[in-house]
């Protein structure tokens, strides 16, 4: 167990613990479950907020040899710490960046005719250009060639792709018709590109029955503790734990207006605690608690104080969150104690839901003002 020195623990208002052992175990679980020849890891967005320089070595030690990132800058960071790894860049080929791919032995994922033409020209003029992947869109309508374009290019590409890939839109929904259609479309593409390794399964795709593991699985969210099967129990170990310090407590009478614009009103005498965390730390303002919101049945944020669920009171502000700690013990809710924002019985998916978003956004927004601690690595 080591403490990161960027922010001394004694000076921090909130504390993020990242369990690298759990991260590695989650990768092994998906590797064993996927049925694919190889299991990669998606480490974009600073390894989903957990820290690239910590997460990548832990995954590599567990046996991961292939990594996916979104941006070229992320690929540079991964290459610096995983010199022998295969690294794919998901967000396509930006004009003029071909020499960077060659210099760092990175693999672009090409998803348009323009990208393919640029890479083909570069590869024809460069003896040691790295391999490239081909992305075909089977339903997302975001990046990638259309299925018809992908089929038309089969046998006509001026280079042999290292990987044929697509991306699910709804694999977390059991029995989704869109998933069945995507698998069928991707099978047509596989037949058109015989011998080319294929990748379709993301985190939730690995847990489909049967799982279309193909040649390469590329999990992301589930590695970091997110539930890839939201209609069932989460099979993954939690990776992140977030705690915030109680910096002040107060007793307020019935009818007290709390927070900006007084949108939360105390119903009876209440005890409040103010936490040293806010939306500047990546905790969404949409988790705010307002009487009108609560009355409409929309969930608001909660934190655990001494194991007791304590609801937010009023708006999440830039640096502070107010809790109603009336039901918590005085010892647990004292000044200097910590409230659990993510962890124990409050998992990343519930935190996302209560903020009107998804756990992905919560993870990738984790702030830089936390004292970070890595364990299990």
Image (spheres, rainbow, N blue to C red):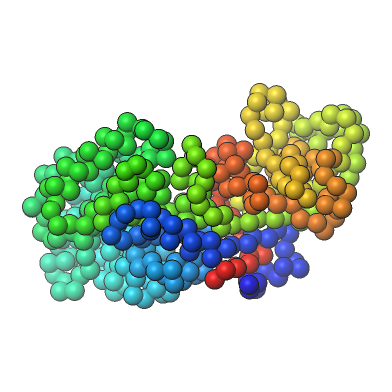
Residue drawn at x 16%, y 42% is 188
Is 123 above or below relative to 112? below
- The quadrant holding residue 261 is top right
* Residue drawn where x is 44% and y is 60% of the image: 27
Can residue 94 be seen? Answer: no
Residue at the left extreme, as displayed:
155
Query: Is any part of residue 22 visible from this angle?
Result: yes
Which quadrant does the N terminus fall into?
bottom right
- Picture coordinates of residue 62, whole percent (x, y): 43, 68
Percent position (x, y) of residue 322? Answer: 77, 44
**Which residue is farthest top?**
296
Q: In this view, does 220 lie to the left or right of 307?
A: left
Quadrant housing residue 189: top left
Q: Residue at x 41, y 55 (%)?
A: 30
**Camera-nearest residue between 276 and 304:** 304
Q: From the image, which quarter does the C terminus lie in?
A: bottom right
Question: x and y percent of residue 179 in the render?
Answer: 32, 37
Left or right of 197, for residue 157: left
Q: Where is residue 304 in the image (x, y as percent from the top left)?
A: 73, 47
User: Is residue 28 left or right of 261 when viewed as pictured?
Assistant: left
**Residue visible at 72% across and 63% down in the picture:** 12
Is residue 222 left or right of 282 when viewed as pictured?
A: left
């Amino acid at each position: 167990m080591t403490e990161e020195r960027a922010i001394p623990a004694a000076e921090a208002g909130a504390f993020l613990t990242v369990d690298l052992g759990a991260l590695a175990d989650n990768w092994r679980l998906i590797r064993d479950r996927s049925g694919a020849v190889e299991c990669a890891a998606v480490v974009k967005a600073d390894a989903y907020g957990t820290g690239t320089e910590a997460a990548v070595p832990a995954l590599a030690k567990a046996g991961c040899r292939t990594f996916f990132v979104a941006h070229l800058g992320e690929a540079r960071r991964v290459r610096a710490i995983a010199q022998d790894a295969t690294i794919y860049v998901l967000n396509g080929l930006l004009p003029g960046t071909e020499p960077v791919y060659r210099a760092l032995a990175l693999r672009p994922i090409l998803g348009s005719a323009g990208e393919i033409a640029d890479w083909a020209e570069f590869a024809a003029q460069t003896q040691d250009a790295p391999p490239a992947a081909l992305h075909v869109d089977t339903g997302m309508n975001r990046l990638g060639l259309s299925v018809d374009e992908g089929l038309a290019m089969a046998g006509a590409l001026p280079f042999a792709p290292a990987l044929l890939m697509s991306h699910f839109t709804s694999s977390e929904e059991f029995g989704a018709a869109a998933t069945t259609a995507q698998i069928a479309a991707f099978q047509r593409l596989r037949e058109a590109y015989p011998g080319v390794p294929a990748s379709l399964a993301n985190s939730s795709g690995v847990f489909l029955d049967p799982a279309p593991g193909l040649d390469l699985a590329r999990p992301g969210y589930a590695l970091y503790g997110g539930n890839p099967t939201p209609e069932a129990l989460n099979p993954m170990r939690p990776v992140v734990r977030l705690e915030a310090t109680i910096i002040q407590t107060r007793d307020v009478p019935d009818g007290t207006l709390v927070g900006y614009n007084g949108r939360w009103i105390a119903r009876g005498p209440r005890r409040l605690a103010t936490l040293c965390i806010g939306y500047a730390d990546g905790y969404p303002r949409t988790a705010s608690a307002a009487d009108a919101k609560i009355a409409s049945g929309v969930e608001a944020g909660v934190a655990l104080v001494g194991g007791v669920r304590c609801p937010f009171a009023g708006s999440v502000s830039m640096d502070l969150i107010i809790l109603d700690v009336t039901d918590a013990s005085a010892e647990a809710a004292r000044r200097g104690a910590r409230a659990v924002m993510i962890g124990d019985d409050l998992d990343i998916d519930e935190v996302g839901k209560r903020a009107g978003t998804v756990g992905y956004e919560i993870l990738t927004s984790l702030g830089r003002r936390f004292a970070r601690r890595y364990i299990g690595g």
